[in-house]
Image (cartoon, rainbow, N blue to C red):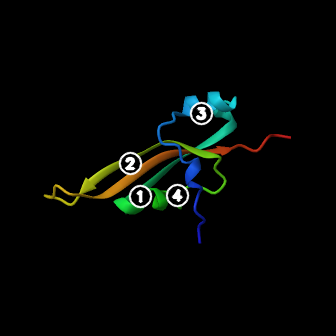
């Protein structure tokens, strides 16, 4: 079973560049991995997304949610979540 990525490391309104500047690293220090959680019920969207994040990620930036409902419905019942996982590259020896 996949483990759940810590929710406190899923950063909603933090851009990639802002995070890199705050930790003093470059984009070249990471492998970037797009993470998508599709068709998850609204009450479980962040938790469901957390299970899709690679366990070796340092953090997820640019996390956002898009809500939608069933066709011809005005009620939002489902959501897709998106984010960018930063996976530290192994230092070259």
17 w.r.t. 42: above or below: above
Chain-order first, disc 3 or disc 2: 3
Q: Which mark is residue 89?
A: none
The alpha-carbon separation of the residues under discs 1 and 2 comes to: 8 Å
The disc label shown at residue 50, or none:
4
Residue of label 1? 45
User: Circle 1 — which element?
Assistant: helix
Q: Residue furthest bottom?
A: 1
- Quickly name the residue at label 3: 19
Q: Which residue is mark 2?
A: 65
- The residue lying furthest to the left in this view is 72
Asked if labels 3 and 4 touch by Cβ distance under 8 angstroms, the answer is no
Q: Residues within 10 Å of mark 1 (few under 14, many from 20)?
A: some
Q: Are marks 3 and 1 in contact (CB under 8 Å)?
A: no
State the image coordinates of residue 13 (x, y, percent, origin top left).
47, 37
Q: Are marks 1 and 2 in contact (CB under 8 Å)?
A: yes
Residues under labels 3 and 1: Cα distance? 23 Å
How far is the residue under mark 4 from the one under mark 3? 19 Å
């Amino acid at each position: 079973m996949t483990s759940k990525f810590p929710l406190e490391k899923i950063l909603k309104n933090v851009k990639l560049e802002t995070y890199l500047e705050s930790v003093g690293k470059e984009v070249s220090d990471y492998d970037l991995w797009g993470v998508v959680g599709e068709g998850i019920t609204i009450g479980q969207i962040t938790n469901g997304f957390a299970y899709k994040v690679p366990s070796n990620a340092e953090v997820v930036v640019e996390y956002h949610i898009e809500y939608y409902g069933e066709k011809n419905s005005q009620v939002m019942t489902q959501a897709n979540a998106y984010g960018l996982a930063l996976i530290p590259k192994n230092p070259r020896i």
